[in-house]
């Protein structure tokens, strides 16, 4: 592990739920990095958070944090609609920025981030913490070495359960504030990991529906994708699945590699099965990650290592764009009823600026009449 004598100075914008994972990761990695300031539009929340994690400075304006705190890294942990403007402010202030998923609400927004990244040379990173578990890093290494043979087929399932009350938070379940449903908000973790293993996709066909949640966005989507390698994969994203699981399975020519977890995995959640005649490959799957979970700490450790070594940290804005394009193509294919090729959504395509393009093919929640006693009885 690389060591630095001076701790990196970290800040956090948005001190709600997920910010705790950022602050805990920073605390775990001390003294290589320290939390020096936080900002939240809610002053009370910012103060309580700063006290809890020992951050010396508190702001209600993200711009003031960026201008005053001499940061080496800032996390953006605010609702999705604010990610792009805050990430641009950070890059323009010269501060590498780690944005919570989804990076942006649309491909057009992510292209703004790409442009400012190119102009300033300041990294704009996205939190995709499941890329950073020991087993996922080992799998990427084995794939890069070519020892598993060609990828043939993969499955990727995010089958989660979010009750109606979860969507009472005003920014959730709406295209203009969350960007989408489980495709953008939940399954994106799993299919980002899938893409990080299988590489560029070329074409996909999808379906999406709002089965039962009080949302404008989908609550289920399914995609079938083809990759440049020739591999085929299915991707399922759901928030209506009572027995929750997150599952990925890769069938390479010489081995099956699979994981089942929920919100984070350790080595024990992975299984490696060599193909007949390739039993020797089991020796290459050395589960040496112990009980280290995939999570924010592992991604922060990777970023701190990269910044200390002066190399590009992960997950780059270009990688994040590929993942967001997969989400945009899922919606475009589902709503247009035809396959979508990688690179096809561009220019003035409606799916460049909104994940629902010209609108989802179901009634917005606000236009659904409130149930009457009669309809409630009929539904019971
Ligand atoms: N990586 C993961 O596993 C994971 C898990 C949960 C949430 N998330 C993502 O994290 C983000 C935040 O989610 P959350 O559940 O923590 O939300 P939250 O509502 O609990 O917290 C957001 C905070 O941001 C503050 N805020 C809003 N606008 C601001 C602004 N302009 N400047 C400063 N502060 C501002 C709010 O006051 C609030 O305290 C979302 O994008 C979500 O998708 C990621």
Image (cartoon, helix red, strand yellow):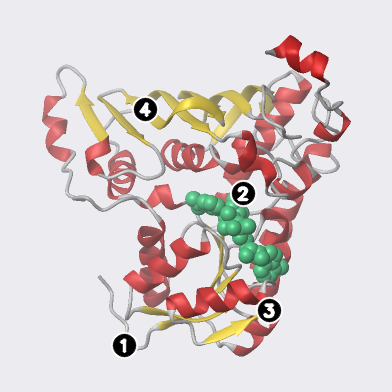
Do the residues bearing badges 4 and 3 touch, measured as CB atoms within 8 Å? Answer: no
Q: Residue at x 44, y 41 (%)?
A: 193
Residue bearing the label numbered 4: 249
Residue bearing the label numbered 2: 321
The residues bearing labels 4 and 2 have C-alpha atoms spaced at a distance of 23 Å
Give left or right: position of 228 versus 261.
Answer: right
Q: Position of residue 62 (x, y in %)?
A: 67, 76
Check mark 2 vs ligand 1: CB closer than 8 Å? yes or no.
no
Quadrant position of ligand 1: bottom right
User: Dot 4: what SS?
Assistant: strand
Q: Residue at x 78, y 38 (%)?
A: 351
- 2 or 1: tag closer to the N-terminus: 1
Looking at the image, is 185 positioned above or below residue 241? below
The residues bearing labels 4 and 3 have C-alpha atoms spaced at a distance of 44 Å
- 4 or 2: tag closer to the N-terminus: 4
The quadrant of the picture occupied by the N terminus is bottom left
Check mark 4 vs ligand 1: CB closer than 8 Å? yes or no.
no
User: Mark 4, mark 3: which one is toward the viewer?
Assistant: 3
User: Mark 2, mark 3: which one is toward the viewer?
Assistant: 3
Do the residues bearing badges 4 and 1 touch, measured as CB atoms within 8 Å? Answer: no
Q: Residue at x 55, y 33 (%)?
A: 201
Q: Position of residue 6 (x, y in %)?
A: 36, 88
Q: Is residue 326 visible?
A: no
Name the one closer to the observer, 134 or 149.
Answer: 134
């Amino acid at each position: 592990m690389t060591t630095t004598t001076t701790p990196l100075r970290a800040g956090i914008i948005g001190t709600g739920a997920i910010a705790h994972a950022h602050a805990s990761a920073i605390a775990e990695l001390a003294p290589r990095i320290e939390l020096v300031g936080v900002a939240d539009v809610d002053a009370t929340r910012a103060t309580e958070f700063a006290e809890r994690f020992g951050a010396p400075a508190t702001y209600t304006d993200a711009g003031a944090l960026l201008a005053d705190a001499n940061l080496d890294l800032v996390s953006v942990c605010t609702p999705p609609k604010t990610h792009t403007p805050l990430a641009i402010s950070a890059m323009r202030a010269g501060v590498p920025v780690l944005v919570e998923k989804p990076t942006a609400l649309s491909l057009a927004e992510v292209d703004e981030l790409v442009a400012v990244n190119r102009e300033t040379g300041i990294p704009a990173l996205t939190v995709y913490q499941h890329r950073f578990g020991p087993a996922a890093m080992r799998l990427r290494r084995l794939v890069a070495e070519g020892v598993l043979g060609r990828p043939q087929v993969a499955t990727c399932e995010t089958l989660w359960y979010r009750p109606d009350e979860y969507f009472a938070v005003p920014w959730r379940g709406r295209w203009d504030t969350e960007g989408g449903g489980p495709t953008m908000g939940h399954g994106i973790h799993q299919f980002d990991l899938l893409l990080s293993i299988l590489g560029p996709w070329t074409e996909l066909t999808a379906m999406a529906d709002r089965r039962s949640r009080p949302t404008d966005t989908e609550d289920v989507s399914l995609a079938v994708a083809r990759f440049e390698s020739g591999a085929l994969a299915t991707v399922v994203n759901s928030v209506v699945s009572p027995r929750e699981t997150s599952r990925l399975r890769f069938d390479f020519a010489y081995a099956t590699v699979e994981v089942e977890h929920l919100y984070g995995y350790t080595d024990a959640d992975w299984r490696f099965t060599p193909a007949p005649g390739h039993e020797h490959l089991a020796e290459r799957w050395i589960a040496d990650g112990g009980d280290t979970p995939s999570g924010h700490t592992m991604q922060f450790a990777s970023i701190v290592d990269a910044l200390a070594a002066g190399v590009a940290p992960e997950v780059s804005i270009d990688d994040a764009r590929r993942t967001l394009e997969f989400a945009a193509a899922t919606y475009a294919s589902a709503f247009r009823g035809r396959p979508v090729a990688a690179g096809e959504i561009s220019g003035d395509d409606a799916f460049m600026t909104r994940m629902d393009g010209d609108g989802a093919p179901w009634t917005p929640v606000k236009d659904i009449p409130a149930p009457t006693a009669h309809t409630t009885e009929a539904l019971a």
